[in-house]
Every structure is written in structure tokens, then in C-alpha cells.
Image (spheres, grey):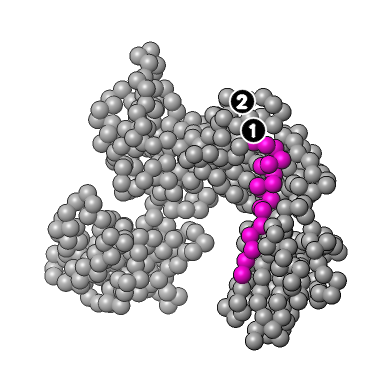
Amino acid sequence: MSGRLYGVGLGPGDPELITRKAARLIAEADVIAYHAGVGKASNARRIAAELIPASVTEEELRYPVTTGTTEHPGGYAGAMAEFYEACAARLGAHLEAGRTVVVLAEGDPLFYGSFMYLHDRLSPRFETEVVPGVPAFAAATAVVATPLVRQTDVLTVLPGTLPQSELARRLADTDGAIIMKLGRRFPAVREALALAGRLEHAWYVERASMPAERWMRVVDVDAATVPYFSLIVVPGDSLAADPTGRRDASSNTSKRQLQSVEKPLPASDATCRPAELLVVGLGPGPEHWVTPEVSAALAEVDHVVGYAPYVNRVPHREGLTRHASGNTVEVDRARFALDLARSGERVAVVSGGDAGVFGMAAAVFEAAEEYADVPVRVLPGVSAVQAVAARAGAPIGADFAVLSLSDRLKPWAVVEQRLRALAEADLVIGIYNPASRSRPDQIGKAREVLLEHHKPDTVVVVGRDVGRAEESLTVTTLGDLDPATIDMKCLVLVGASSTRVTVGGQAWTPRFVNHENDVSTR
């Protein structure tokens, strides 16, 4: 009969915070396993030392590396994967022999812990139970005696290893926050807190609940002294008491600043001069595809308004307020931005790709008919059709058109009519919004319409997430196009009769039209 595996949380460091269940299982175990750093004693074993029976078999699982530097051919990830496989094999042998194995875990076993990697490998084969432990951030919050979140506040736990811009964005968009994994990353984390406007109220806690515990304001920390066993508490509670005994009403300024587009703004002062409203395109994804003009504009505005995924792409900085909303409230979003601009605020409405190509520019001008006093300026961006075409070669090197398959703002009958007209004109067609969960069949219908006028061997390019890490590009034909492979992340280019594919697989459309391909002779 196989043994049983336990992942036992020990809490943040104080042995008195070990749960009664954890203590019982440690005392009853046949095998006690624990991780240890390179050249260091196991902190997990230190916490549980008084509970470990003298007769128990101990398995020390010593990491081969603790940083990203290693000579392993698979790099850090490869070295760690090989290590966890070896650990699982060692513990698996005990379990196969019918022994009870307890793996000691600092904090909670499944919260940024190493036990989860053993759990992944062993739980499918052996009966496994996880015993939760007090996480380090709970101990740290108790140390500073500051309410972290209450009522509808949102708490976000962040690793300090995130890129600084991403960390700043997430800090700006949440109420309370915990930042873990500091160490050498502390200077970048501190800068991210400043960019997000959260530095003043952030607290640093080191070795919470341990004898060497200490805590202070983040602004007072010497970066050279920050160890791995440290974290930052960012209270989201505006009523939180200052650990020094003061009560700070100004902490409301560090609350999440995202506002709903439905929230009415106060009437603008009659003496206030409206500011120019900017509508900008962020490009298809990569930061280096954002134009210098757009970057400069975003560095100057006080507010960014847009669909949440696009707002999230704007680097956060101190003084910037972000207003994110859903994907089907474009005109409401535009009115919100216009109201802000009318009150004198510097505002940018953001879109992916180019704001003028199925983006927010048209929605802003639609709403702006009621805001004649607010000037609007559109800044161009790289469009998705340009990005996909560039990756494919030069398929839009001649006449082309773009069309959205979405029938949210126009009837499907109109979409079909326009598809037929474009096919009859023998234009290259860039198809936006080809499919979604609510309309998965439209790309298949569009293919059928196009095959009424195009040969099955017509060149088709499918670009998905072009410019991003998950990018893929497929060059196929209209006859072989599988609609089931198309989703909302795709842009589809359907070639003209003259579009060709090189020996190397690149698509291009000649600038000239052969007489036999001219629609006037067909």
C-alpha cells in the first residue's frame, strides 16, 4: 500500500504560528522533507525543529541554484525542472514503500512555495493532502497593525520580479497590495511605487514574526540591506490607522483611481478653458511599435481613457489617472473623456492599432457633436493590417480594403453585401474582428461568400497576436482556410487574384494589374 504525501505549511517563521494539525502530522511522519538554499541551512527545518522526532528519516532537498545564473544547458528553468524531478523521485520511493511523507513549507505550501512543484509531480500517483499555513503577508500586516483591505477593496499580491512598468500599473489599479520577492529588486520596486503614487503609504517588513523582525516606511529603507525574506505592505484601506498612532485621512489618494464611465463629472467651471482631447493609437502590441509622437503625448496627459486592455498598456507614472471600461461603451467612454477635457483636464483616449481604423476616433467624433467647444486631435498608430501585412511580406502592395465582420453596429446583410462588392472588385481584403465567442460562424460565412467570386487557391494570410510573444502567421489559401482556427485575436488578409507567394513563403501583391485580371474584361 502506498504512503501518503502531506504538504505542511509552517507559517512565516514563528514556531508558535504552526497549526495544531501541522504539528501533529510532523510528529507522526515517517519521512520529513524540506528545501534548503545553496550553502544555507533550511529555514523550514529551523521553524519546525522542536517538533521533528529524533527517529524520523529526513530528506534535505537542496536547490542547485538560487538565481538565474547557471551553466545548465536548459538555463535556470532547466536546472530547476531537473531538480524537482529528482526530488520527486526520492520522495516517490518512500511513498511507494508505504511511508508517510511530510514536506515542510514556509508560509503556505501553495503560495509561492516549492511544494507545489512536488505536488504537480506526485499527487497524480499518491494520495496527497495540503495543510495550509499562515502566509508571510498576513504576519507582515499584523506587524504594522494596519488594516489592509475592507468591504469591497481589492487586494493584489505582486512579485517584485515583475517589470517595473507592469508593477507600477498594477499598483495604480488596485486598492491594497502586497509585494513579495524583494532582495536585489528593491530599487525597481521602490521606483514602481513612486510611479504609481503609492510610495508614501507603503510599509517595508523584514522577517515578519521572526526574532530579527523589523519594519519601517519604504522611503526609509536602505536598499543595500534588503534580504529575500522581506515584503512590502501597501494599505488600501483609507481609514487605516498609521502604525505610529496617527490617522491619515489623505490615504484616500492612494485608492484605486479607475473610474466608471457612467460616473457623472461635476459641471465644468464657466471660466475654465477646454483642453484639447487627444485620440491615440498604441499600435498592435509591442512598445517599440508605439510612435514617438504618441509616447510624448502620453507623457504629458493627466488622464488616460479607454478599453481596459489598452489602458493597461500605457506605462503608469505619478500623477496619471487611468479610466478603464468595457468593450461596448465606446460613445459613453468618449463623452466621459470629452467632459474631462471640457473641464480643462489633459486627456488621451487610447485605442489598439490605429485609433482611426475601427478604433475610438470615430466614437469620439460622434460624441463630440455635442462638444463643439472641445478641440479633438487624432494621433496615428501602426494598424493591425499593416503589422500583419509586413510580417507576411507585401500583400497590400496594391489596392486593398479593410472590413470588420462584427455585426454589432451594422446588419450582417450589409457585411455580406460589402464582401461581395470587394470580391467582385478583386481587391485585397483585410478582415478585422473575424470571430468571437458570440459569433463564431461569421468567418465561415464570409469564406463562402468570397468563394463565389474567388478561386480556392486565392492566397490567404492569418495573423494572430502579431508583434506579441504568442505571435503566429499562417499563409494558406481560401479553399484550405479552416474557420475553426480563427478567433478574435486574428486578422485575416484575403488576397486578390494577382496575389502571389514566393518560394520562401512570403505573400505579395503586384502593383500592376494584368489585362486578363482586370475586372472590366471578365
| Residue at x 79%, y 48% (from the top left corner) | 210
Toward which corner of the image does residue 436 lie, by quadrant? bottom left
Looking at the image, residue 208 sits to the left or right of residue 158; the answer is right
Q: Are marks 2 and 1 in contact (CB under 8 Å)?
A: yes
| Residue at x 63%, y 25% (from the top left corner) | 247
Q: Is residue 370 above or below residue 479?
A: above
Looking at the image, residue 178 sits to the left or right of residue 399; the answer is right
Residue 17 horizontal/vertical position (percent)? 72, 53
Residue 202 horizontal/vertical position (percent)? 66, 36
Q: Inspect the magenta stretch and tell me whether residue 378 lies in it.
A: no
What residue sits right under mark 2 in the picture? 248
Q: Residues within 10 Å of mark 1 (few under 14, many from 20)?
A: many
- Kindly identify the amino acid type of the residue bearing the numbered disc 2: Asp
How far is mark 2 from mark 1, CA to CA?
9 Å
Q: Inspect the magenta stretch and tell me whether residue 131 lies in it.
A: yes
Please state the extent of the stretch shown in magenta in the rendering: 129-146
What residue sits right under mark 1 in the picture? 201
Tell me if residue 73 can be seen: no
Q: Residues within 10 Å of mark 2 (few under 14, many from 20)?
A: few
